Image (cartoon, helix red, strand yellow):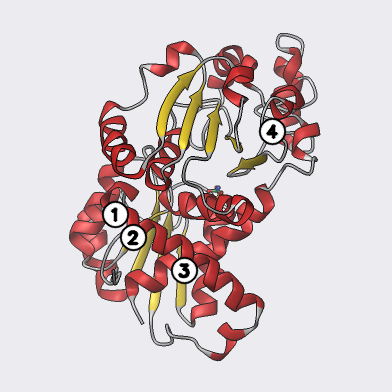
């Protein structure tokens, strides 16, 4: 079936079909090959086009992926940072969207509320790409399942475990991605978090599981969850934009859910470890040193600055998080190319 995504926005992955998600993953793989072969330097389909990338929160991967993908395609790229505009402060989202829609051929947005991205879609009149909201991280998901496909081949019936803060945007996004791929997904975190997984997302994913295969399991035992797993995925315990004060409670709730070698050794032999990054795995950041000094005696698992994953796992052959980070570039290029059109 021919896929045509021209004019579409990637606000939520749930607005796409299984064929469309698979198409984006396959196109990302093709564009990666083509960049490696130097072919993209010959063809810049976005010459004369411009994109805006708007961030209410900081970013390394998402920002750089949009900037480099834009440059590879020949587009002009305008970065608008958390302090760089009146968006949502002195000017409404609707009015900003109407202005940007007249300047740009596409808009990336990273913020908090999903309704802000909905307003950008409604009022800008150009494709809008969700670069992370409180609810979802859909551009990340295309890179994540692209990486899984590169590592594992066919994904149907494979098992992915997302462990840690399973009620956050990444937990929900991995659930959605797995449902499109027909994978078995286990969300592993404290029992008290299980009720906070959004019912509307579970309902939509159940429809996809019925169609594509795969299933959802909830667990609060990381060793049992890891059994037969092909992929173990985690994310930071306090998300971008959440207050630092939350760390004390979160470490207390999640200390049993750190990815360590015991968990890795309970999974399949060639387990793939993924993390959307940035990761706290050692004391090489100001932030993790601060956490270690404040909470290291109360919670010994964080005394070396590692939180959601041990440094041993992070430095191991199982860690494919840097392939995954590179794939943000190729997948964001695929998303821009197919939704703006060429
Ligand atoms: N994974 C991710 O979104 O990274 P950044 O916050 O650096 O964009």
Left of 22 or right of it: where is 59? right
Q: Which quadrant would residue 262 be assigned to in this image? A: top right
Q: Are marks 4 and 1 in contact (CB under 8 Å)?
A: no
Q: Which quadrant would residue 294 be assigned to in this image? A: top right
Determine crowd level at label 3: few under 14, some 14-19, many 20+ residues with C-alpha closer than 10 A.
many
Above or below — where is 50 with respect to 121?
below
- Residue beneath disc 4: 287
Measured as percent of width and height from the top left, residue 54 is found at 41, 58
Above or below — where is 181 with respect to 194?
below
Q: Which quadrant would residue 20 be assigned to in this image? A: bottom left
State the SS at label 4: helix
Q: CA distance from mark 4 to mark 3?
A: 37 Å
Q: Nearer the viewer, mark 2 or mark 4?
A: 2
- Residue beneath disc 1: 17
Location of the C terminus by quadrant is bottom left
Q: CA distance from mark 4 to mark 1?
A: 40 Å
Q: Are marks 2 and 1 in contact (CB under 8 Å)?
A: yes
Instruction: Tell me which label, 3 or 1, sits earlier in the chain.
Output: 1
Left of 251 or right of it: where is 94? left
State the SS at label 1: loop
Instruction: Tell me which label, 2 or 4, sits earlier in the chain.
Output: 2
- Residue beneath disc 2: 20
Query: Measuring 34% from the left and 38% from the top, which residue is drawn there?
Result: 209
Above or below — where is 195 with respect to 241?
above
Instruction: Tell me which label, 4 or 1, sits earlier in the chain.
Output: 1
Which disc number belongs to residue 27? 3
């Amino acid at each position: 079936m021919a896929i045509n995504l021209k004019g579409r926005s990637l606000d939520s992955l749930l607005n796409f079909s299984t064929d469309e998600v698979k198409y984006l993953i396959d196109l990302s793989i093709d564009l990666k090959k083509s960049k490696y072969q130097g072919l993209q330097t010959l063809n810049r389909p976005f010459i004369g086009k411009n994109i805006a990338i708007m961030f209410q929160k900081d970013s390394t991967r998402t920002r750089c992926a949009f900037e480099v993908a834009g440059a590879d395609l020949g587009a002009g790229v305008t970065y608008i940072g958390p302090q760089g505009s009146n968006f949502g402060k002195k000017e409404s989202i609707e009015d900003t969207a109407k202005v940007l829609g007249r300047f740009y051929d596409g808009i990336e947005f990273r913020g908090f509320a999903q309704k802000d991205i909905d307003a950008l879609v409604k009022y800008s009149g150009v494709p809008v790409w969700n670069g992370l909201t409180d609810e979802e991280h859909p551009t990340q998901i295309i890179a994540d399942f692209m990486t899984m496909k590169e590592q594992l081949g066919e994904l149907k019936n494979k098992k992915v475990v997302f462990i840690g803060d399973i009620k956050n945007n990444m937990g929900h996004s991995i659930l959605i991605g797995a449902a499109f791929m027909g994978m078995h997904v286990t969300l592993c975190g404290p029992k008290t978090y299980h009720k906070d997984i959004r019912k509307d997302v579970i309902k939509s994913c159940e429809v996809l599981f019925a169609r594509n295969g795969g299933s959802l399991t909830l667990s609060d035992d990381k060793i049992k969850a890891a059994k037969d797993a092909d992929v173990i995925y985690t994310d930071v315990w306090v998300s971008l934009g959440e207050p630092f004060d939350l760390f004390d409670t979160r470490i207390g709730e999640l200390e049993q859910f750190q990815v360590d070698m015991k968990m890795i050794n309970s999974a399949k032999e060639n387990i793939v470890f993924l993390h959307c990054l940035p990761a706290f795995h050692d004391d090489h950041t100001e932030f993790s040193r601060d956490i270690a000094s404040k909470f290291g005696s109360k919670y010994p698992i964080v005394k070396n600055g590692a939180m959601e994953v041990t440094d041993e796992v992070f430095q191991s052959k199982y860690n494919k998080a840097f392939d995954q980070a590179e794939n943000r570039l190729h997948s964001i290029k695929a998303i821009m190319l197919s939704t703006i059109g060429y």
